[in-house]
């Protein structure tokens, strides 16, 4: 990482390496248990929109893994920036939305890092050898 950024960027990367998701409060645990007992799949991050009912059509509910890359870099003025893309309006899901580069797991991908960097290369031409993964955040279910 040291060869790819300033000391500020290296310090941010170091902070992110120590990231640990916050422990849920007793109220959050109770709410999650209630939703799970009602037949919902609930993300550990607790976003309300990630609670997806699965009882109505279990055959259609097969989560598809995907991974995105949060690519943080420094702009010309030293500010931290993140790469975002705008999805094509012709896509069947999330069309026209602004998103992080990434996409569905390919059966040849060995892990989420490989998925995210492969997709970033396809979408924005980012060379995977320039990426230094500093943390992997916990997964959650998309609304779609």
Image: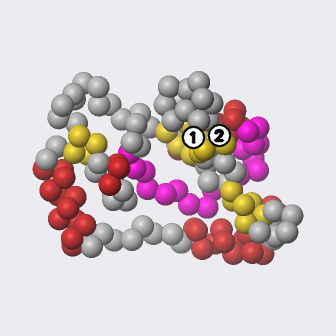
50 over 107 or under it: above or below? below
Q: Residue at x 17, y 65 (%)?
A: 30
Provide the secondary structure element on which disc 2 rests: strand
Q: Earlier in the sequence, mark 1 or mark 2?
A: 2
Q: CB atoms at circles 1 and 2 under 8 Å apart?
A: yes
Q: Quadrant of residue 62?
A: top left
Q: Which residues are magenta?
A: 124-141
Q: For the residue carrying disc 1, how many other residues have a C-alpha within 10 Å: few (<14), some (14-19), or many (20+)? A: few
> Considering depth in this image, is 16 or 77 the residue closer to the camera?
77
Look at mark 2 in the image and give the residue it sits on: 86
Q: Position of residue 83 (x, y in %)?
A: 69, 51
Left or right of 138 on screen, residue 73? right
Write down the residue under mark 1. Answer: 97
By secondary structure, the bulk of the magenta-drawn segment is best described as loop
Q: Quadrant of residue 34?
A: bottom left
The residue shown at (29%, 31%) is 61
Q: CA distance from mark 1 to mark 2?
A: 6 Å
How dense is the environment of label 2, judged by Cα within 10 Å: few (below 14), some, or many (20 and up)?
A: few
């Amino acid at each position: 990482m040291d060869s790819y950024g300033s000391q500020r960027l290296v310090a941010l990367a170091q902070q992110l390496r120590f990231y640990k998701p916050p422990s849920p409060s007793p109220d959050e645990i109770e709410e999650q248990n209630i939703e799970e007992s009602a037949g919902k799949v609930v993300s550990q991050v607790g976003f309300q929109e990630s609670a997806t009912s699965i009882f109505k059509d279990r055959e259609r509910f097969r989560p598809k893994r995907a991974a995105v890359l949060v690519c943080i870099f420094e702009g010309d003025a030293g500010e931290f920036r993140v790469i975002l893309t705008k999805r094509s309006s012709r896509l069947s899901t999330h069309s026209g939305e602004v998103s992080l580069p990434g996409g569905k797991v390919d059966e040849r991908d060995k892990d989420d890092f490989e998925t995210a960097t492969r997709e970033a290369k396809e979408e924005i031409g980012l060379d995977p050898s320039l990426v230094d993964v500093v943390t992997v955040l916990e997964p959650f279910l998309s609304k779609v």
